[in-house]
Image (spheres, helix red, strand yellow):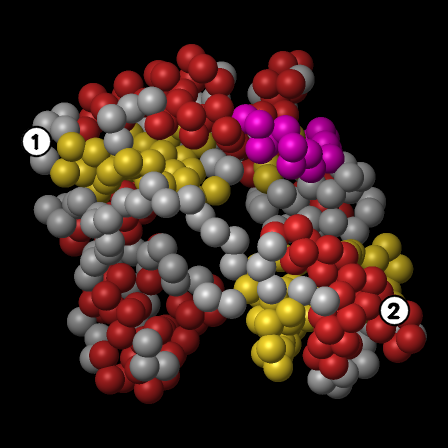
Amino acid sequence: MAAWILHVDLDQFIAAVEVLRRPELRGRPVIVGGNGDPERRSVVATASYEAREFGVHSGMPMRVAARKCPDAVFLPHDPPAYDAASEVVMTTLRSFDAVVQVMGWDEAFLGVSTEDPWALAREIQREVLARTGLSCSVGIGDNTLRAKLATGFAKPAGVYELTRDNWVAVMADRPTEALWGIGRKTARKLAELGYTTVAELARADPEVLAARLGPTIGPWCRTLALGAGSTVVSATPYVVRSRSRETTFQQDLTAPAEIAEQVAMLARRVAQDVVAEGRPAARVAVKVRFAPFFTHTRSMTLPAPTSAAADIEAAALEVLSRFTDDRPIRLLGVRAEFGT
């Protein structure tokens, strides 16, 4: 039997979980984020397809979402509920004869051997729906990149196959940002070099890419455009690489002493998470979002790995001192990264 990789992606997962809990919301625009109050500073965690028709998307400030879709139902973000729903989905996927690599709450890769990946994909969809009430889309590919991209063409609740055979026909004329791993900033840099489509990027000179994007990222972008990806799916549980805490302030912070106090408090909370994780932190980072919405992150490597709250707090304050911008601050975050 042939080896295939399937990418299973739950449709509008967070919004769908909320609609299952509140069936009366089915068909209405639903926006989930923060404590559910669009007047408070927070961002959209997810939006139902009905809300997306108004231009609402994940990461958008809730206030902006409310202006775009004033008739939406706004709900608070409830991670424990999504954890529970995700666990049932992943247990369902593991019931198949497949290697399952969980990628998050709402998606997973499955490594399978089958002569009919379409039939298997449909069976997975039926089983997930029967056990959870949630619909999913399935991408079929000959590597993880193609399977992941195929899911985008399958949504919602469909199946799509993307392999070496149809890669050029499907992807050649699409913008470079359509590739998994190339974001808006990288796409802009590529456009400056004259590479705006996947086909153009596939023909790019690796040395030119390396000079503009770096010796690793540059050639890697070209590899993506060629459709190359991993053919290995691993069931090894994902090990977190960091722990972080952040706070969005309802009123911008301007006083240095208050800013430092907030960073210190966040650092102490992160230190508690580090202790609970049972692994020492090797690096500390501070994220600052200046008004209106400019985000910068700086970090430092610790002299030695540590779980001590005092050391993590001191490092966070040291990193904070490296910011020279005096604009008002709307968000602060502290992250502790674990060593390898």
Residue drawn at (82%, 45%) of the image: 39
| Residue at the left extreme of this rendering | 1
Can the viewer see residue 113 in this picture? yes
Closer to the camera in the image, 52 or 313:
313
Which residue position holds label 2? 261
Residue drawn at (76%, 37%) of the image: 36
| Above/below status of 321 relative to 336 | below
Residue type at the position of mark 1: Met
Residue drawn at (49%, 18%) of the image: 132
Side of 5 relative to 262 (left or right): left
Please report contact status of discs 2 and 1: CB closer than 8 Å, yes or no: no
Tag of residue 92: none
Side of 256 relative to 14 (left or right): right
Determine if the magenta segment contains residue 77: yes
Side of 141 relative to 154 (left or right): left
Q: Pointer 2: residues within 10 angstroms few (<14), some, or many (20+)?
A: few
Can the viewer see residue 160 in this picture? no
Q: Secondary structure at mark 1?
A: loop
Closer to the camera in the image, 183 or 134:
134
Q: Pointer 1: residues within 10 angstroms few (<14), some, or many (20+)?
A: few
Alpha carbon distance from label 2 to label 1: 61 Å
Residue 115 image position (x, y, % from top left) = 10, 28
Closer to the camera in the image, 282 or 138:
282
| Quadrant of the image containing the N terminus | top left
Q: Which residues, given as a range, are shown in magenta?
A: 70-85
Residue type at the position of mark 2: Glu
Q: Secondary structure at mark 2?
A: helix
Closer to the camera in the image, 304 or 156:
304
Side of 280 relative to 40 (left or right): left
Tag of residue 1: 1
Residue 122 image position (x, y, % from top left) = 28, 21
| Above/below status of 124 relative to 316 | above
